[in-house]
Amino acid sequence: MFNNSRVLAIIPARGGSKSIPKKNIKPLAGKPLIAWSIETAKVTPEVDRIIVSTDDDEIASVAVSYGAEVYKRPAHLATDESLVIHAIQLLVKELQDEGEKAKYMVLLEPTSPLRLSTDVSNCIRILTGQCIDSVATFKDAELNPHRAWQIDNGQAKTFIPGAIPWYPRQKLPRAYQLNGAVYAFRADRMDKAEMSLFFGRTAAVMIPKERSVDIDDEIDWELAEILMKRRLQQCQA
């Protein structure tokens, strides 16, 4: 509860990952991947309820064992081509039909296990303290768009016309990218959302690189495991 309004944490976790089989329940630094997001939500003081949206029975069982509720999503909303927003829109409608009055919601992707509860709280507090519709977390862009290229029929040209890729980093405009760690949004304004939960009047929260790993492949996984083990060691020191 924050400012007398309920806050829900939603964790989308479909089965069928191809890049890393059973990714959402694969152990990372001693716990199933999804457990890190559930536990982050549990220690975020503003969050009243934690729901995992999944099509997979194994994921559902692990989620319940770590203290989350589970709502099953239809198979057609759990394919490689499905957009997360469509599953969330269906879930929000189902919850509202059941009488859930939460005004604010946060989406926590299991693939961002290194976020902290303070990152989630910051998004919620910005969302509730300003006249905006959604908040998302960002990091510095891994590649400045002024250094990106297009290759057409073997010929290279700058992605941005007129860009000078040779400038030192300090002379390039600073660029950012979504890191996927937290999306916070007003449930009553989802009619503005089309392709994503970052919609309407928006705000940004910066997260440092070491908390911004978004696991998509085995290299990402190895990096996340190294950083998580380092964090755990520091906590025990």
Image (cartoon, rainbow, N blue to C red):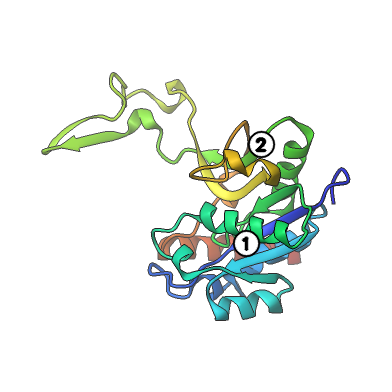
Residue topped by disc 2 = 133
Q: Is residue 109 left or right of residue 70?
A: left
Q: Is residue 170 left or right of residue 18?
A: right
Badge 1 amino acid: Ile
Q: How many marks?
A: 2
Which is more toward the observer, 14 or 186?
Answer: 186
Which is more toward the observer, 119 or 7?
Answer: 7
Viewport quadrant of the C terminus:
bottom right
Q: Is residue 23 above or below residue 40?
A: below
Crowding at mark 2 (Cα within 10 Å: few <14, some 14-19, many 20+):
many
Write the residue at 60% across / 44% down: 208
Write the residue at 44% across / 66% down: 76
Residue topped by disc 1 = 11
Badge 2 amino acid: Asp
Q: Position of residue 121 (x, y in %)?
A: 75, 47
Q: Earlier in the sequence, mark 2 or mark 1?
A: 1
Which is more toward the observer, 108 or 81?
Answer: 81
Write the residue at 38% across / 69% down: 18
Q: Quadrant of residue 53?
A: bottom right
Q: Position of residue 100 (x, y in %)?
A: 77, 58
Write the residue at 70% across / 79% down: 65
Q: Position of residue 103 (x, y in %)?
A: 76, 47
Q: Label 2, secondary structure: give it.
A: loop
